[in-house]
Amino acid sequence: MLPVERKQRIVEFVKQRQVASVSELAQAFQVTIRRDLAEAELEGLLKRTHGGVILDQGANVEPSFSERASDQLEQKRRIGKYAASLINDGDHIILDSGTTTIHIAQQLVHRKNLTIVTNDMNVAAELRDCRDITVVVTGGTLYHSSFMLNGLYTDHVLGTIHVQKAFIGTPAIHPQYGLTHPEEKLVPTKIGMIRAAQEVIVVADDTKIGKRSLHQVAPIQAIHTFITGTEASELHVEAFREAGVRVHCV
């Protein structure tokens, strides 16, 4: 059986059962199928879990802020620490709203001569005592569940600034489809951040990789650097690098 045909049959097998273990699939197809599963996940057909696979439901609904804040916490701390190391004294940067970018802010509290633009009240609060950092809060409509600012005023401010680096969070990043998001109202702000920056750096844990959602934020060509955890699969990492993205697994 050709690998392409086998992969199609694996997907059909999982569709019939909704979930399947790696051992079940290996027994059913009498082969070592880990590469087939990795390729199917890369194509958005399946999602691997611990010891098995399920149908990929994409990123159609973003979990609540409290759920996201506690999920993959150690990985997000590593990502935040590494991202902060890419920021030079004197830089003007954007920190997007999110549960990963807040870890970047926490790593910057002892830095000097930075200008940080953010639409996240949590990020601004982390930096409130930093006398040597200029914090620009975009304004906008407050999202009470996450302390994010968004909307017309946010987008207007972002249209008037230029920065060296923008650190962007995302619920879905794919080496072919780029950044996507399930919430239509949040897309213009992320687009504005990307347009305002000379370098676009995406920060996202490995659970966001390979996902697609309804609305495109940016094609993969708009991303210069991607920082994720060492948990990311090598197949995914290589796909991003082939697309021209610098990838740092930390």
Image (cartoon, rainbow, N blue to C red):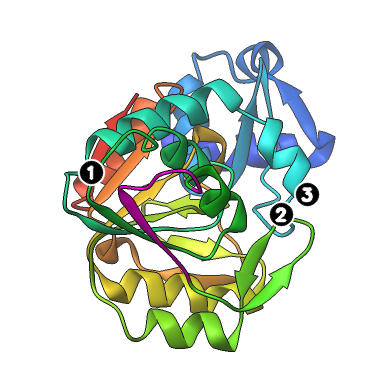
Of the two numbered discs 3 and 1 in the rendering, the one whose residue sits closer to the viewer: 1
Q: CA distance from mark 3 to mark 1?
A: 29 Å
Note whether 178 is above or below 44 in the view shown. Answer: below
The percent position of residue 164, horizontal first and vertical second, equals 19, 61
Q: Look at the numbered disc 1 and give the secondary structure of its residue.
A: loop
Report which residue position mark 3 lands on: 64
Q: Residues within 10 Å of mark 1 (few under 14, many from 20)?
A: some
The percent position of residue 122, horizontal first and vertical second, equals 60, 50
Note whether 182 is above or below 46 in the view shown. Answer: below
Q: Look at the numbered disc 3 and give the secondary structure of its residue.
A: loop
Label 2 near label 3: C-beta < 8 Å? no
For the view shown, which residue lies furthest in the right direction?
Answer: 17
Taking depth in this image into account, of 229 and 83 the one nearest to the observer is 83
Residue type, numbered disc 2: Glu
Report which residue position mark 2 lands on: 62
Image: magenta residue range? 128-137
- Could you tell me which quadrant the C terminus lies in? top left
- If you read the primary sequence from the N terminus, does the residue marked by circle 2 or circle 1 appear first? 2
Note whether 71 is above or below 218 in the view shown. Answer: above
Report which residue position mark 1 lands on: 87
Residue type, numbered disc 1: Ile
Q: CA distance from mark 3 to mark 2?
A: 7 Å
